[in-house]
Amino acid sequence: MEAVAKLRNCPMSARKMRLVADLVRGKKVEDAVNILRYTKKEAAGWMEKLVLSAVTNWENKTEGAKDVDEHDLYIKTLMVDDAGHLKRIRPAPQGRAHRIRKHLNHVTLVIENRIPFDSELTDEEE
């Protein structure tokens, strides 16, 4: 069973977020949270909240299954996409104006369990 969490319009460039995403892609959820907690990048804080949100979504989807360790959750898909720019203007010398482009990104995270539920086995057998 899969669960999805999305982070939209994060105020950081996609390139910086991908550096952190590459650290945890394909890892177990417990390992990913530990890696993100001790990574000294701003993107790690955003990503840790997203992973915990995905776990909560998974628990809600599976009707309150609190035993995350038994089902061996892992990060199945982690995509970081560019989301455009916020455009601002900054004063420059001699009455001119320079543009400032503040980058944004979207992150999509999908987690899945490797050990199926008992109810999933009965649905497949029928």
Image (spheres, helix red, strand yellow):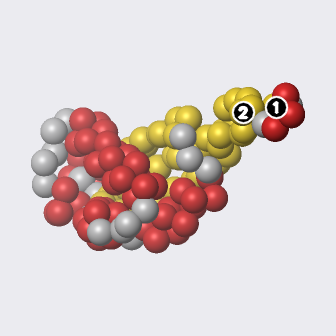
Expressed as whole percent of the image width and height from the top left, the position of residue 118 reads 21, 53
Expressed as whole percent of the image width and height from the top left, the position of residue 124 reads 36, 51
Residue farthest to the left, as pictured:
66
- Local SS, label 1: strand
Q: Does any portion of residue 51 appear in the rendered image?
A: no
Which mark, residue 97?
1
- Local SS, label 2: strand
Expressed as whole percent of the image width and height from the top left, the position of residue 42 reads 43, 55
Quarter-wise, where is residue 113 in the image? bottom left
Q: Nearer the viewer, residue 49 or 67?
A: 49
Q: Mark 1–mark 2 contact, CB under 8 Å?
A: yes
Circle 2 packing at 10 Å, graded few (<14), some (14-19), many (20+), is few
Expressed as whole percent of the image width and height from the top left, the position of residue 112 reads 38, 55
Residue 101, relative to residue 115: is it above or below?
above
Q: Nearer the viewer, residue 19 or 70?
A: 19
Quarter-wise, where is residue 73 in the image? bottom left
Circle 1 packing at 10 Å, graded few (<14), some (14-19), many (20+), is few
Residue at 26% across, 42% down: 56
Residue 65, relative to residue 40: is it above or below?
above
**Along the horizontal axis of the image, is 58 left or right of 97?**
left
Q: Nearer the viewer, residue 97 or 120?
A: 97
Residue at 29% across, 48% down: 52
| Labels in figure, total | 2
Residue at 65% across, 40% down: 102
Residue at 48% across, 64% down: 20
Q: Amino acid at mark 1?
A: Ala
Q: Does any portion of residue 6 appear in the rendered image?
A: yes
Q: Amino acid at mark 2?
A: Arg
Q: How far is disc 1 from disc 2 in space, using C-alphas? A: 6 Å
Which mark, residue 90?
2
